[in-house]
């Protein structure tokens, strides 16, 4: 399974910072996490819980349908 964004994790305010928050479990900032499961540290309780429930991070998915193109391929 895969969610579009992983934003339902508990967050805490970073003291002394007006608009900065981080994951309660792994202490990674929300701007680093950026809605991705692999944005959490590998030992994060939230990440482990979701991975054990069958959710996948982008790091574990295969992206075989995406083919890169050079700018020279198009006029």
Image (cartoon, helix red, strand yellow):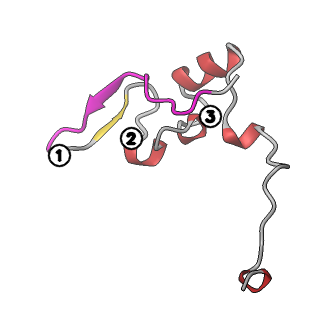
| Cα–Cα gap, marks 1 and 2 | 13 Å
Q: The N terminus is located in which quarter?
A: top right
Q: Which mark is residue 4?
A: none
Q: Is residue 40 magenta?
A: no
Residue 49 point in image, percent of width and height? 60, 16
Q: Return the residue at label 1.
A: 17
Choose between 75 and 47: the one closer to the eye: 75
Would you say 35 lies left or right of 19 here? right
Circle 1 residues within 10 Å: few <14, some 14–19, many ≥20: few
Q: Nearer the viewer, mark 2 or mark 3?
A: 2
Q: In the orientation shown, which residue stands out farthest toward the top?
A: 53
Q: Secondary structure at mark 1?
A: loop
Choose between 61 and 47: the one closer to the eye: 61
Residue 59 point in image, percent of width and height? 71, 42
Q: Quadrant of residue 74?
A: bottom right
Q: Which residues are magenta?
A: 3-17
Of the image marks 1 and 2, the number of the one nearer the N terminus: 1
Of the image marks 2 and 3, the number of the one nearer the N terminus: 2
Residue 34 point in image, percent of width and height? 46, 44
Q: Return the residue at label 2.
A: 30
Q: Quadrant of residue 37?
A: top right
Residue at 71% across / 82% down in the picture?
71
Q: Return the residue at label 3.
A: 42
């Amino acid at each position: 399974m895969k969610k579009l964004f992983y934003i339902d994790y508990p967050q805490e305010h970073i003291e002394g910072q007006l608009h900065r928050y981080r994951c309660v479990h792994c202490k990674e900032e929300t701007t680093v996490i950026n809605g991705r499961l692999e944005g959490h540290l590998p030992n994060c309780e939230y990440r482990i819980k979701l991975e054990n429930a069958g959710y996948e991070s982008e790091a574990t998915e295969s992206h075989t349908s995406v083919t890169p193109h050079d700018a020279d391929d198009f006029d």
